Image (tube, rainbow, N blue to C red):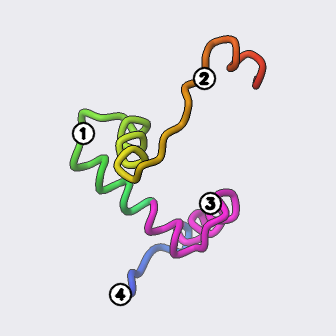
Amino acid sequence: MGIVNIDDDLHEQVRRASKVSARSINAQAAYWIRIGMLCEMNPTLSYSQVLKRELEAAGVTAPSLSPDRAAVDA
């Protein structure tokens, strides 16, 4: 593990995002780095497609929302 120097403004954004996503500051930065790397390596995929692929690779499955269910949840 190493130290990464980032701009103070970016650090503040990571700190704020970490509160919203219930991650530590380091975990939030690692998440952004990992997803950013995957998006760069797979430029034809959207963020949602990258995330779906990673969740499936981890064995996570979620039921699809039917149009009726989505209206109820909205």
Q: Secondary structure at mark 2?
A: loop
Residue 25 forms part of the magenta stretch: yes
Residue 51: where, in percent of width, then height?
A: 42, 44
| Gap between marks 4 and 1 measured at Cα | 28 Å
Residue at the spot 61% in from the left edge and 16% down from the top edge: 66
Q: Secondary structure at mark 3?
A: helix
In terms of sequence position, does the residue under pointer 4 or pointer 1 come before the other? 4
User: Where on the picture, by quarter, is residue 62?
Assistant: top right
Q: Assess whether mark 3 and mark 4 are in contact (beta carbons under 8 angstroms).
A: no
Three-letter amino acid code of the residue under disc 2:
Leu
The residues colored magenta run: 10-31
* Residue position for label 1: 43
Three-letter amino acid code of the residue under disc 3:
Ala
- Which label sits on residue 1? 4
Residue 23: where, in percent of width, then height?
A: 61, 67
- State the residue in front, 72 or 13: 72
Residue at the spot 37% in from the left edge and 35% down from the top edge: 49
- State the residue in front, 4 or 30: 30
* Residue position for label 2: 65
Residue 3 forms part of the magenta stretch: no
- Mark 4 is surrounded, within 10 Å at the Cα level, by few (under 14), some (14 to 19) or many (20 or more) other residues, namely few
In terms of sequence position, does the residue under pointer 2 or pointer 4 come before the other? 4
- Mark 1 is surrounded, within 10 Å at the Cα level, by few (under 14), some (14 to 19) or many (20 or more) other residues, namely few
* Residue position for label 3: 17
Residue 56: where, in percent of width, then height?
A: 39, 44
